[in-house]
Amino acid sequence: MSATHIQLDSHGRLLHFLTVEGLTRRHLTDILDTAESLRGVAERRVKKLPTLHGKTVVNLFFEASTRTRTTFELAAKRLSADVLNLNIATSSAVKGESLLDTLRNIEAMQCDMFVVRHEQSGAAEFIARHVKPHIAVLNAGDGRHAHPTQAMLDMFTIRRHKPDFPHLQIAIVGDILHSRVARSLIHALNILGAGEIRVIAPRTLLPAQVETLGARVFYDPGQGLRDVDVVVMLRLQKERMERALLPTEQEFFQRYGLTEDRLALAKPDAIVMHPGPINRGVEIDSRVADGPRSVILEQVTNGIAVRMAIMSITLGNHARPAGGTV
Ligand code: NCD
């Protein structure tokens, strides 16, 4: 059984959120619509809903994170859950045994949801296969594989600015090879019927057969950025590079960095996105990152509502009787 299947129950409802791959338009639209309805909670005097009252959410982070961990924590707290944060710094590969041991110990604390970030692809799925059936597992980024909640917050941000998906041209620029964000986003864009997805990168930073994911490849931003509606910049993920794939950061910036001049090739109302953390002067110029077209901080805010949506949908589905209606 693949990650695609293990995350759904026999009625096709989401029990875990491990990958966007294989989900339907309805799954994704449901998440986006629920997030839209939860967005207003932040504007209330009391920024809380009782949805997860009495539930315990464990943030299980084996890899560094700022935005993702804190917005997951806020999302859980705004839904009235109790939250436990575990940052387990580890540089070694997943050892089935030790991960399972950690899991069993936390399970013994009677929690209801694991939010997992791990440097190893497949870690969240591994955990989903081994937890007790009442526990929901959300993937907060596994190796180079997937970062589905990031993809959904990106889709949510795009939809708020550019809802006409079939006519959209989106460019994803930079280190595609190591990017779980790019992989999940390309899947989500395809499922929701985006017009054209372009990836722009040097050959050394593109995965083999990236076209099979449903993206058009450009090596030259001068061509790839022309007339796009959305530009998604990615960080050079040096911690995931096993060997030097680039001459220098300066040279990368010269060839691929998003400057005001390069952005001028896109549509005049194009938006600029970045999952963060941003490296100013490496993949993006400060004037663009802080400029009027940047929605980078909006992405962070939107991450809370989107994560609230995914948490309430998955835990809500766990609470339903197996034979219940969708
Ligand atoms: C991304 C990640 O960790 O995959 N960041 C994030 O979740 N906001 C992208 C990155 O690390 O560059």
Image: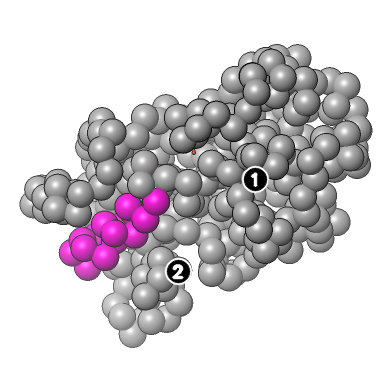
Q: Is residue 87 left or right of residue 291?
A: left
Q: Is residue 176 above or below residue 285?
A: below
Quadrant housing residue 251:
top right
Residue placed most toward the observer, 22 or 78: 22
Look at the image and tell me in which quarter the C terminus lies. Answer: bottom left
Q: Residues within 10 Å of mark 2 (few under 14, many from 20)?
A: some
Stretch in magenta: 121-140
In reply to whether residue 125 is colored magenta, the answer given is yes
Q: Secondary structure at mark 1?
A: loop
Question: Which is nearer the N-term, disc 2 or disc 1?
Answer: 2
Residue type at tag 1: Leu
What residue is shown at x 74% (from left), y 24% (from top)?
Answer: 257
What residue is shown at x 66% (from left), y 55% (from top)?
Answer: 210
Label 2: which residue?
4
Residue type at tag 2: Thr
Q: Is residue 314 left or right of residue 201?
A: left
Q: Is residue 73 left or right of residue 298?
A: left
Q: Is residue 113 above or below residue 305?
A: below
Residue 130 coordinates in the image, percent (x, y): 21, 63
What residue is shown at x 56% (from left), y 39% (from top)?
Answer: 302
Q: Secondary structure at mark 2?
A: helix
Residue 258 coordinates in the image, percent (x, y): 76, 25
Label 1: which residue?
206
Residue 234 coordinates in the image, percent (x, y): 62, 34
Q: Is residue 22 above or below residue 110?
A: below
The residue positioned farthest toward the bottom in the image shown: 323
Look at the image and tell me in which quarter the N terminus lies. Answer: bottom left
Quadrant housing residue 136:
bottom left
Residue 117 visible (yes or no):
no
